[in-house]
Image: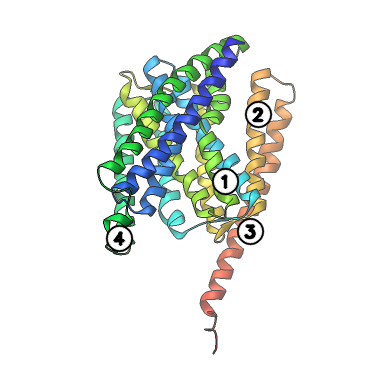
Amino acid sequence: MMVYLLVFAGLGLLVAGAELLVRGASALARAVGMPSLIIGLTVVAFGTSAPEFAVSLEAGLGGQADIALGNVVGSNTFNVLLILGVSALVAPLAVSAQLVRLDVPVMIAASLLTWVAAADGVVARWEGLALFAGIIAYTALLIRLGKKGQPAPVPLEPRQEPGRGPAGLVKPTLLVLAGLVLLVVGARWLVQGAVDLARLLGVSELLISLTIVAAGTSLPELATSVVASIRGERDIAVGNIVGSNIFNILAVLGASAAASPAGVAVSPTALHFHVPVMVGAAVACLPIFFTGARISRWEGALFVGYYAAYVAYLVLIASRGASLPAFNAAMIFFALPATMLGIATSVVWAMRDRNARDRHPPRPSGS
């Protein structure tokens, strides 16, 4: 009972800490005059990944490599397949041109780099530093693009900006500090609880981190994207997921590997199955996002279905289920080919529609 209490208490502190951190960081950014676009692309997406950062860093420093890696890989898979899928089921999601041209390719490249770095069985310290340098470069690029597209600010009277100035920085700074404290304590409790739970259930720490820990640390992304979808802020729902996945790989895994003298060890199971699943989920976003200006409900259902299949596979592996060979055959010979055919058909129809619009552009109203 104490193990379960430790896990749930750790999750609760992580969610509360992330909420305080996001609120404080957003208010702090506004207080210093940061554009709202930059807040959405960096503070919201990166802030909701704060639990992953805290848990993986704590696990990496404590020698629990399976938890450090499994949390990142499991969270990214959870983000794309389940959170993005559920958000699209709530309402079709808008996809901006920048996501297709920049952010999704960056997410795919980061996922592939993780696979390459893990190929020798360890993400070394220098590879972690290289990944972390990537998040710095990506953030700098976002800020540059945001400023380029930001209209010139209109001067306002001091009384119209009550949040500006030194006085306006006190409350946001306190929120950020409180959030960080809760994240550190919550991460420590969750990692310890996850290790004890794995031992109690007789399963690997990797399996616990891929399911319970990954789902728990992704709760801020889930809440943010679903609520944004319900409120009609569908570009935020998609951008939050893509930005969080980029942050998870470059910053979370990068910092965890850089902070550990031996790097982050990668088990054969993670290398040959779970990391490829994460890469496949990232790659699947590009053709689906390309098929139009939105992610449809059927595509959301497809993502959710694949996450259910992924979890079912993990359960069958853990329980050594007799139906595992039949499950593998169904996925390889039916589900995957049918999905590829459906996506390819959608891409072809999308390209035909765009070519038709280019040849016959809509006439201006009143003509």
Q: Position of residue 311 (x, y in %)?
A: 64, 30
Q: Nearer the viewer, mark 3 or mark 2?
A: 2
Residue most extreme to the front: 159
Which residue type carries mark 3?
A: Thr
Which residue type carries mark 1?
A: Val
Q: Nearer the viewer, mark 1 or mark 3?
A: 1
Looking at marks 4 and 1 on the same chain, the residue that comes earlier in the sequence is marked by: 4
* Label 1 environment density (alpha carbons within 10 Å; few <14, some 14–19, many ≥20): some
For the residues marked 4 and 1, what is the alpha-carbon distance in whole angstroms?
Answer: 29 Å
Q: What label does residue 227 carry, if any?
A: 1
Which SS class for mark 1?
A: helix
Looking at marks 2 and 4 on the same chain, the residue that comes earlier in the sequence is marked by: 4
Who is closer to the viewer here, 259 or 150? 150
Residue shown at the point (63%, 26%) measured from the top left: 314
Which residue type carries mark 4?
A: Lys
- Please state if 151 lies on the left or on the right of 314 as rendered: left
- The residue at which mark 3 appears reads as 345
Which SS class for mark 2?
A: helix
Report which quarter residue 115 is drawn in: top left
Q: Position of residue 333 (x, y in %)?
A: 69, 40
Q: Position of residue 108 (x, y in %)?
A: 45, 44
- The residue at which mark 4 appears reads as 148
For the residues marked 1 and 3, what is the alpha-carbon distance in whole angstroms?
Answer: 31 Å
Q: Nearer the viewer, mark 2 or mark 4?
A: 4
Looking at marks 1 and 3 on the same chain, the residue that comes earlier in the sequence is marked by: 1
